[in-house]
């Protein structure tokens, strides 16, 4: 069994065993579960879910129609849905045309009336399921929806991950970048089409957006390295079908790596993980073993944590808190 000794910033000398280091990583991971639990239990989170429920899930065809006409659109809804959310579509705004299904109830004397009412009512244009009442699809008609940017009014409740600001821990970017290239990937900086970063296993490229603070950029780099270290990119079908689990794992790795360097990513990580795991905290907990294993490997390759002594870094973090 090996032990390591290092001197912290406060001049204290600590010795820790691999078991203690593993325990510290497990503790750091536990912080994520606790943080996500607190977040999904908050009023702000519930308000956000209530709002999200009002937005319709659009069919793939309509998602494409929106993307073609309004590539910058982030949240679209019909005139009345916006009104119910306390927002008004601005005068003169041009709607985004999508297709709404027209349904009818066959063999009923009131079929025509029902159908007309249905058409008038439906501004959602999604997979308005005609499963109820034996309604059948008769065709589609064009309806218009509007992006949030075309509306004014009350702010939508949102618990979005907050981009980290400030400096990155000294040396961490280079350490992580070295590991990314060590895995055979080319590291790029630049626009990521709205994402903070991505890993493209086909091109063997990891890309991180270049218009954020260094603290955010290094956290994103740790997230992408987390995807690689957890094996998500070698198994693309799993990555695509179990996206939620992969995102929870990669972001948790990033949190632990950042925390071990004294960078608190909770403002970003908790909301991000909750966004993918929802109220299913078992999903966050189940990731513990994968996350701590990957984080340990990454931290072992970080000269920026003195002697890769993560326990000491974590102790310092606790001291500073
Ligand atoms: Zn990811």
Image (spheres, helix red, strand yellow):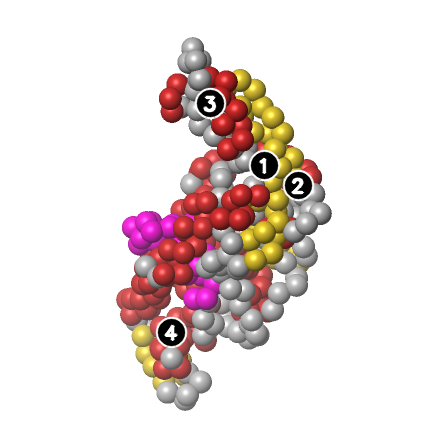
Q: Which residues are magenta?
A: 266-287
Between marks 1 and 2 in the image, the one whose residue lies nearer the viewer: 2
User: For the residues marked 4 and 2, what is the alpha-carbon distance in whole angstroms?
Assistant: 52 Å
Residues under numbered marks 1 and 4 in contact, where contact means CB atoms less than 8 Å apart: no
Residue plotted at (50% across, 33% down) = 121
Tell me: is circle 4 under 8 Å from ligand 1: no
Residue 227 visible to the viewer:
no
Disc 4 is placed on an element classified as: helix
Dot 2, crowdedness within 10 Å: few (<14), some or many (≥20)? some
Query: Residue 131, percent across and down?
Result: 40, 23
Disc 2 is placed on an element classified as: loop
Residue on which disc 1 sits? 63
Residue on which disc 2 sits? 95
Q: Earlier in the sequence, mark 4 or mark 3?
A: 3
Residue 128 visible to the viewer:
yes
Residue on which disc 3 sits? 114
């Amino acid at each position: 069994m090996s032990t390591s000794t290092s001197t912290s910033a406060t001049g204290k000398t600590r010795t820790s065993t691999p078991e203690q280091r593993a325990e510290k990583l497990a503790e750091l991971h536990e912080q994520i579960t606790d943080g996500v639990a607190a977040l999904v239990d908050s009023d702000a989170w519930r308000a956000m879910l209530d709002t999200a429920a009002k937005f319709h899930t659009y069919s793939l065809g309509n998602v494409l129609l929106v993307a073609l006409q309004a590539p910058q659109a982030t949240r679209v809804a019909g005139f009345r849905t916006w009104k119910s959310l306390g927002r008004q579509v601005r005068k003169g705004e041009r709607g985004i045309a999508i297709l709404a299904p027209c349904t009818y109830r066959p063999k009923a004397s009131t079929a025509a009336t029902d159908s007309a009412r249905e058409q008038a009512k439906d501004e959602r244009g999604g997979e308005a399921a005609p499963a109820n009442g034996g309604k059948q699809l008769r065709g589609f008609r064009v309806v218009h929806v509007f992006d949030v940017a075309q509306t004014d009014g009350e702010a939508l409740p949102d618990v979005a991950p907050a981009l980290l600001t400030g400096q990155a821990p000294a040396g961490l970017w280079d350490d992580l970048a070295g590991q990314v290239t060590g895995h055979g990937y080319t590291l790029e900086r630049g626009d990521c089409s709205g994402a903070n970063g991505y890993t493209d296993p086909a091109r063997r490229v990891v890309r991180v957006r270049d218009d954020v603070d260094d603290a955010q950029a290094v956290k994103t780099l740790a997230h992408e390295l987390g995807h690689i270290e957890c094996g998500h990119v070698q198994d693309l079908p799993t990555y695509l079908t179990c996206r939620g689990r992969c995102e929870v794992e990669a972001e948790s790795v990033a949190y632990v790596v950042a925390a071990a360097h004294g960078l608190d990513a909770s403002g970003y990580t908790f909301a991000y993980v909750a966004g993918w795991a929802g109220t299913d905290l078992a999903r966050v907990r189940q990731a513990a073993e994968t996350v701590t294993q990957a984080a340990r490997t990454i931290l072992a390759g970080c000269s920026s944590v003195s002697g890769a002594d993560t326990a000491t870094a974590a102790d310092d973090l606790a001291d500073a808190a």
